[in-house]
Amino acid sequence: QVQLVESGGGLVQPGGSLRLSCAASGSIFSIYFMGWYRQAPGEQRELVASITSGDSTNYADSVKGRFTISRDNTKNTMYLQMNSLKPEDTAVYYCKARTPKYDAWGQGIQVTVSS
């Protein structure tokens, strides 16, 4: 099984930056897709950014040009660099790893953008 642990969330002012980390452990060799999702109160969970095993990336229109997804295979960690943050980016952020047999989710981490 794959286990995922997010870190790096918190409170930031509008226009500020945060970097989220997602550390993976367990059967990481089976992962072929990883992504960051977010869920605001009363809203459905949505895909923010994703990266494949071939390093192909994809972004939601709402974050293009502001967020960057990356990974460090030596540390088994995926990152989400978030710049120019807006109040509407406030949500619980989750990382997900997809394997041929199942999806694994992290526990989620709160990001709050407020003055």
Image (cartoon, rainbow, N blue to C red):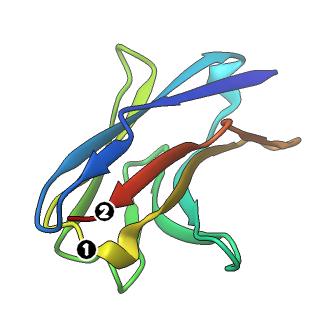
Front-most of residues 88 and 67: 88
N-terminal of the pair, mark 2 or mark 1, is 1
* Residue 54 located left or right of residue 92: left
Residue positioned 63% across, 22% down in the render = 28
Q: Residue at x 71, y 77 (%)?
A: 44
In screen coordinates, is 81 left or right of 89? left
**Residue on which the image places disc 2:** 113
Which residue is pictured at 32% across the width and 74% down the height?
87
Q: Quadrant of the N terminus?
A: top right
- What separation in Å lies between label 2 and label 1 (alpha carbons)? 6 Å
- Packing grade of label 2 (10 A; few <14, some 14-19, many >=20) is many
Instruction: Assign a secondary structure to mark 2.
Output: strand
Which residue position is annotated with label 1? 86
In this rendering, would 101 be left or right of 81? right
User: Which of the numbered marks, if any, corresponds to residue 43?
Assistant: none
Residue at the image point whose x is 28% and y is 64% from the top? 114
Indicate whether 99 appears above or below 44. above
Q: Amino acid at mark 1?
A: Lys
Residue 115: image location, x then y, percent: 20, 65
Is residue 88 placed above or below 69 in the rendered structure?
A: below
Q: Position of residue 40 (x, y in %)?
A: 58, 70
Disc 2 and disc 1 in contact, CB within 8 angstroms: yes
